[in-house]
Image (tube, helix red, strand yellow):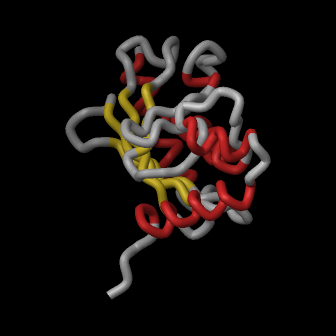
């Protein structure tokens, strides 16, 4: 059942905390189908130094169906909808396989942050910057939003 699978993943997450310091997955206290994750922006990207929060809504037929995942933290990225946080990632749609776990989905999202796909943009402004070759403009917008939304406030 999906509950048994999620409980198994929960135990694995407890074990992997030390192994994967870039991902902190937390299960809701009252609902095993709701999870949040804190992921660290990959180094050598405009997201470096940021911590981004993701929300997972896991469907009853999981792992036969993918979880719904969205960014709660604002992020300037071609494959993330700026307002809703929706993520355009093949494994969350048609390329899903029950072999994926919530932890591996987080890893895939971190990889997407490091390697945006400007040809299937949910954020056209950011996709257009990359498609037109304005990497500098993209990086400065992305790092500005990282500073504003994903970095702890000092003071």
Front position in the image: 140 or 30: 140
Q: Seen in the image, is 73 located left or right of residue 108?
A: left
Residue lying at the far right of the rendered structure? 133
Q: Is residue 10 visible?
A: no
Residue 89 in percent (x, y) is at: 61, 28
Q: Quadrant of the C terminus?
A: bottom left
Residue 42 in percent (x, y) is at: 66, 58
Vertical arrangement, residue 47 with respect to residue 7, above or below? below
Residue 148 in percent (x, y) is at: 43, 67
Q: In the rendered picture of this protein, how many numbered marks are placed on residues? A: 0
Front position in the image: 46 or 72: 46
Residue lying at the far left of the rendered structure? 30
Residue 1 in percent (x, y) is at: 41, 14
Q: Residue at x 52, y 38 (%)?
A: 80
Q: Residue at x 37, y 36 (%)?
A: 84
Q: Is residue 82 visible?
A: yes
Q: Residue at x 43, y 26 (%)?
A: 68
Q: Seen in the image, is 155 located left or right of residue 25?
A: left
Residue lying at the far bottom of the rendered structure? 155
Q: Seen in the image, is 2 located left or right of residue 20?
A: left
Q: Residue at x 57, y 36 (%)?
A: 124
The quadrant holding residue 127 is top right
């Amino acid at each position: 059942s999906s509950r048994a699978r999620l409980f198994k993943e929960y135990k694995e997450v407890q074990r992997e905390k030390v192994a994967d310091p870039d991902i902190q997955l937390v299960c809701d206290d009252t609902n095993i189908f709701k999870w949040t994750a804190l992921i660290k922006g990959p180094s050598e990207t405009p997201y470096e130094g940021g911590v981004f929060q993701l929300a997972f809504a896991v469907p009853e037929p999981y792992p036969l169906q993918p979880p719904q995942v969205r960014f709660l933290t604002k992020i300037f990225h071609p494959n993330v909808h700026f307002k809703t946080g929706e993520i355009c990632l093949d494994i969350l749609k048609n390329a899903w396989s029950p072999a994926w776990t919530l932890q591996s989905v987080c890893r895939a999202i971190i990889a997407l942050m490091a390697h945006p796909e400007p040809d299937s943009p949910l954020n056209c402004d950011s996709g257009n910057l990359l498609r037109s070759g304005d990497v500098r403009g993209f990086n400065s917008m992305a790092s500005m939003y990282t500073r504003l939304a994903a970095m702890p406030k000092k003071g």
